[in-house]
Image (tube, grey):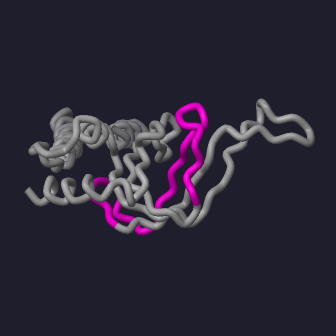
């Protein structure tokens, strides 16, 4: 859209008028690029396999709503402070920000190092440093990766059966 406004403002400044045909061509190119962008979004969203037999219902729901499905190892834990509730000499913790190394990613981010948060409103348990978890994360209202609840992080030793089924799910 900025190309069209630049063309119109340039034509007014130079005194020459761009023909309506030229403006239509610019508009057509812009619309084509927007359509390609939308199409790419739909194609990417349809990359998720649809065969879900063998996965428990809760896992299927988590898988469908998650933007990131990965096996991670927690390497750092930081407190999320609520400045509105904090008083001088006392800090109110509203959750935790975790830094993790991705061991295996089934869906979502391709980076090795991941950050996600878990708010105490959603889950009162704190994930342990150095432990491997199987996580389902999605973006929160601020655009950061977050776990929606306690059931979105499964300790690796408890998730062996789910991991095997998930491998089969993504391999077809």
Query: Would you say residue 106 sits in the magenta stretch?
Result: yes
Q: Residue 64's quadrant in the figure?
A: top left
Relative to the observer, which residue lies in front, 13 or 75? 75
Point 33% across, 52% down: residue = 69
**Residue 108 visible to an observer of this rendering:** yes
Query: Would you say residue 118 sits in the magenta stretch?
Result: yes
Q: Residue 84's quadrant in the figure?
A: top right
**Image spot of residue 150 (x, y percent):** 47, 40
Q: Is residue 37 left or right of residue 68?
A: left
Q: Is residue 54 left or right of residue 140?
A: left
**Image spot of residue 77 (x, y percent):** 62, 57
Point 91% across, 42% down: residue = 89
**Residue 15 visible to an observer of this rendering:** no
Range of magenta residues: 104-128
Q: Quadrant of the N terminus?
A: top left
Point 67% across, 45% down: residue = 80
Q: Is residue 41 left or right of residue 168?
A: right
Relative to the observer, which residue lies in front, 5 or 125? 125
Relative to the observer, which residue lies in front, 41 or 139? 139
Direction right: furthest residue: 88
């Amino acid at each position: 859209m900025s190309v069209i406004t630049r063309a119109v403002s340039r034509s007014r400044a130079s005194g020459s008028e761009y023909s309506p045909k030229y403006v239509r061509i610019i508009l057509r190119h812009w619309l084509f690029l927007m359509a390609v962008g939308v199409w790419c979004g739909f194609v990417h969203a349809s990359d998720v396999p649809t065969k879900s037999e063998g996965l428990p219902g809760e896992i299927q729901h988590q898988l469908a709503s998650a933007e990131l499905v990965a096996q991670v190892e927690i390497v750092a834990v930081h407190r999320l402070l609520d400045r509105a509730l904090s008083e001088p000499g006392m800090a109110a913790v509203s959750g935790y920000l975790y830094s993790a190394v991705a061991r295996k990613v089934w869906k979502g981010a391709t980076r090795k190092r991941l950050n996600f948060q878990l708010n105490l409103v959603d889950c009162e348990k704190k994930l342990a440093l150095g432990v491997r978890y199987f996580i389902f994360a999605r973006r929160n209202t601020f655009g950061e990766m977050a776990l929606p609840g306690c059931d979105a992080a499964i300790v690796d030793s408890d998730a062996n059966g789910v991991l095997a089924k998930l491998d089969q799910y993504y391999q077809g």
